[in-house]
Amino acid sequence: MTVSWKEITLHNQEGFAEAMAMYDQAFPIEIREPHDVFQNSMRTGSYRFLLGMEGEEILSFATGHYLKEVNAGFIVYLLANPLVRSRGIGTQTLLKLEEWLEEDARSAGCDSIEAIILKTEKLELVHTEEEKEDCVKRTRFYNKNGYQEAKGIRYIQPPLFQGQIPVPLNLYVKNHQQTLPSRERIAEYVQAMYRGKYSLANGVDQAILSDLLAKI
């Protein structure tokens, strides 16, 4: 399988509709973000929307923000076409997005990125056996790719759209050190995530974000 990589931007929307169709199929409507949020993210100027392609077929996509104020990346989505899972496309896509975020860090004047952050569901909060199995698989996947759970951090995902309630999630961090950053530093990452993604792209009220940040 030969994978080529393509970036969706405000000025190059080829593949966006197809990626959103994959997204809509993968996530139930009650946890899906409006497609406008992806477009809003592109307007922030520090966002990556990566497509993995084989010919004209979309194999995967991933999205992430570079948070300049803390020199960290925040991976929001990583999704593989169900027809090509278990063929290594998830790992390839993750590594390519990490590479792009590293490039963003160097473009910002840093020697390398300090950390990359992502979030996953809490095992105790999923409902079905299938969801539990998927949750365990995701944890193993991210552990295998160098991500460690930031235990002791009470991360709460802000509402993705009006009317949704905030959701507690696990936070995972990857960096170049043997140990995770301090609790205080991770809180700074989260503050930047709230501002760079949930405030600017989702339009979440600052009062809500401040309240969630105080609960970490």
Image (cartoon, rainbow, N blue to C red):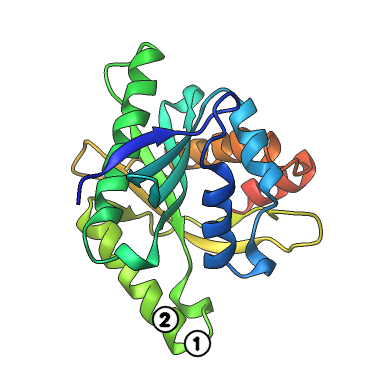
**Res. 96 image quadrant:** top left
Q: Which residue is mark 2?
A: 132
Up the image or down, 98 lies above or below 109; here it is below
Q: Which residue is mark 1?
A: 128
Q: Amino acid at mark 2?
A: Lys
Q: Please provide percent x and percent y for residue 182.
A: 37, 41
Q: CA distance from mark 1 to mark 2?
A: 6 Å
Residue under the point 47% across and 42% down: 63
Q: Please provide percent x and percent y for residue 106.
A: 33, 16
Residue nearest the viewer, comparing 13 with 75: 13
Residue nearest the viewer, comparing 169 with 4: 4
Question: With 190 as the anchor, is 144 left or right in this view?
Answer: left
**Res. 148 image quadrant:** bottom left
- Badge 1 density bin: few <14, some 14–19, many ≥20, Cα 10 Å: few
Question: With 81 as the anchor, is 43 left or right in this view?
Answer: right
Q: Please provide percent x and percent y for residue 59.
A: 36, 53
